[in-house]
Amino acid sequence: MDYKNFKIETDEDGIALITWDMPEKSMNVIDLSVMEELDAVVDQVVGDDAIKGAVITSGKNAFSGGADLTMLEGLLKDFHVQRAKDPEAAAKALFEGSRKLTLVYRKLETCGKPFVAAVNSTSMGGGTELALACHARVADEDLKMGLPEVKVGLFPGAGGTQRVMRMADGQQGMQFLLQGKTLRAPQAKQLKLVDEVTQSKKLVAAAKKMLKAGIDPVKPWDKKGFKLPNGNIYSPAGFQFWPAANAIYRRETFDNYPGARYLLHAVVEGLQLPMDLALQVESRYFAKVLQTPEAANMIRSLFVSMQELNKGARRPIDQRPNNIKKVGILGAGFMGAGIAYVTAQAGINVVLIDRDQEAADKGKAHTEDLLSKAVKRGRSTEDKKAKILSRIQATADYEELADCDLVIEAVFEDREIKKTVTEKAEAVMKSRAIYASNTSTLPITSLAQASKRPKNFIGIHFFSPVDKMMLVEVIMGKRTSDRALAMALDYIKAIKKTPIVVNDSRGFYTSRVVMTYIREGLMMLADGIPAPMIENAGKMAGMPVGPLSLGDEVALDLAWKIVSATRKDLGVKYVEGPLDNILEEMVVKRERFGRKNGKGFYDYNGKDKSLWPGIPDVVGQPKSADSFNIEELKQRLLVMQALESARIFEENCLTDVREADVGSILGFGFAPYTGGTLSYIDMMGTTAFVELCKKFTRKWGPRFKPNKLLREMAKDNETFYGRFPPKGEVAVKDAA
Ligand code: NAD
């Protein structure tokens, strides 16, 4: 039989090699055509007497990226349309539609002939679930195996929850599922999720050898007397484990993620049942979680929108792709060194410049450190390390910038210094080369005044630590050209990060919103709310850290500098508030700058930290926690950030709802289960959101006053996605 996505070759030993290789895709994903064909492939294997067993592998350089979630989005859209007419039929269709893959995998698992998965390199989501449904698994040393569904608000719904927990140690299995983390080959083997690890060139041979040695086509859980690795749920061991699992779930999620909640349900209930029923239970919860707004928002922002932005949704269509060969970096400090590392790792040559050779070398040493750690952990090799390091030329000589396509400036946050280096760099740069500043606060338009070619001047704002943070904020100055934007976006694509594009303003988007979160924490202190309650409210609301903790990380002296600059800029119009007093006390009087000098709202002792007992000396004795409503505090922290985002959107600094949402989650960890700042407003409804803002204005102050755009939208309860539908995705050819 001929398939679009699979090729089958049977050898003289009767082993069918099934190669999954989707045409016109760089990665195998699971879509409807794959499901249908895989079903037919199983029939073919079963029906052909010459075939004794089968090996499934991928023809690409990775096994699979998992399910194509746009398929689920489509299923959900149909569900919502149908639900209005016939809710029962709609629910049934969603249940059946969303368990198709489960049934194909179960058919493979019970077909009577053994299947071995030969997993090459990356295997995610539905791809991993396919491997788990096979009767044995061989992986190569580059394996990265994950079930990351919880990260987009779902859980593994094609048997993953049931099979992992029947194969792995309970605690490790639960952690793997709940955290959505990626396993390397040794960990996957330790968890018993793969049986053998081998070199990639020996992968298929090893899988065939396994089959020849004999693989039982009946899974242990389909035989009488099967025992779970950690014993039954209702057993002394189960009694030790499951109440703790529930507590861990609460600690990790604060019950904000329905995907994680239903995952736990599916596991606990499914493990008490035979496999077919267990899979039915899993499917029921999967259909349930699909219908939650959290899942819909997370799929939209963290899968669909992120993919569109990564593919260049904001790239000007008429600009030719840039083939970026050499990038100059000015300033080899904390940020410059990180930018050099990610650029060299993407195969681009780097000129790393600082004031003297020693400082430039120090910046390059950062790459060496990171690579040495990777080699030590088995994630890289000495060869790769040497290759990447050879791409970085550390120097103090500006002449080396002559053949750079792009120069990124990351010197001190000081206008005069930035002006000097801009002039020095432009004096040697090619006239068509693009110049970008990594400034975190200074408006790009004003920095571009130092440039003779303001059209070629743009902001490329990285987040720290550069190697870990996935977002890059691109800032358009007043005169920045589309050519400069295309260059910035092509560069960000090359280093495999996600871009958002914003118009110029003080603090741009991300820094401006983050500052409101920190400010709200300080305002809460001034309101007499106990510091631990403020920090817990932040974490319970879904933020990665509390606002006081974040203030310490960003540095309180920096916050004080920003407040002082704003006061200077606004002059008599500046309204003094509790914020000024708290920061002045902390920074000027007590030299508590935050983590960087080991004392801020927390005291730091190595990796340990604890809230500073002297906080009441600065803000007064707190009131009793009972006088505050924790739900309201959680809302207060999220509403302030969402409101600021809506203002930035109205001011046209943000122009695309996708960027507001994706940028907020990737840039500052805004409660991911909401789908981002604007999705949070949409989820609540603009009418309810504006009412809440008004209530907070009366109770907590005028900074909660809803802006005009929101008040207008609230009249008809309009949504951001309804009123400002994202523009279509723009196809961009890869650079030659
Ligand atoms: P840093 O102090 O660690 O590094 C600045 C580097 O610039 C130093 O190595 C310094 O020697 C070098 N330098 C100064 N004058 C120079 C000159 N004339 N020529 C060449 N090199 C010169 O600072 P950083 O934290 O890396 O910040 C750099 C820029 O990145 C700033 O504009 C900052 O606002 C921005 N930024 C910082 C962060 C962050 O988290 N630190 C995040 C985003 C953006």
Image: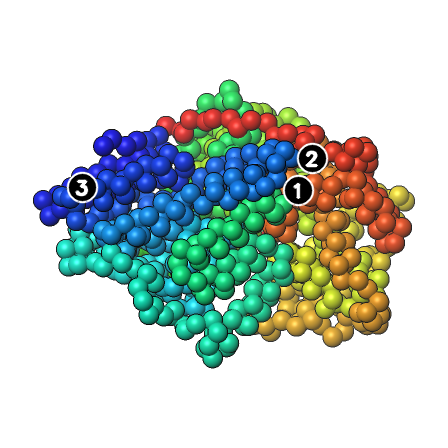
**Residue flagged by tag 2: what amino acid is it?**
Phe
Q: Say which residue appears at 42% left-offset and 50% top-offset.
A: 158
Splitting the image into 4 quarters, where does residue 31 fall? top left
Q: Say which residue appears at 75% left-offset and 59% top-offset.
A: 631
Splitting the image into 4 quarters, where does residue 616 fall? bottom right
Circle 2 SS class: helix
Q: Position of residue 569 (x, y in %)?
A: 81, 43
Circle 1 SS class: helix
**Residue flagged by tag 1: what amino acid is it?**
Ser
Q: How is the image coloured?
A: rainbow
Circle 3 SS class: loop
Specify whether residue 603 is in view: yes
Residue 48: mark in rendering:
3
Mark 2 or mark 3: whose residue is earlier in sequence: 3
Q: Position of residue 566 (x, y in %)?
A: 79, 46
Q: Say which residue appears at 22% left-offset and 51% top-offset.
A: 113
Q: Is residue 30 left or right of residue 439?
A: left
Q: CA distance from mark 1 to mark 2?
A: 8 Å
Q: Is residue 233 left or right of residue 586?
A: left
**Residue flagged by tag 3: what amino acid is it?**
Asp
Q: Residue under label 2, please give it.
A: 720
Within 8 Å of ligand 1, the CB of disc 1?
A: no
Q: Residue under label 1, please give it.
A: 679
Dot 2 alpha-carbon crowd within 10 angstroms: few under 14, some 14 to 19, many 20 or more:
many
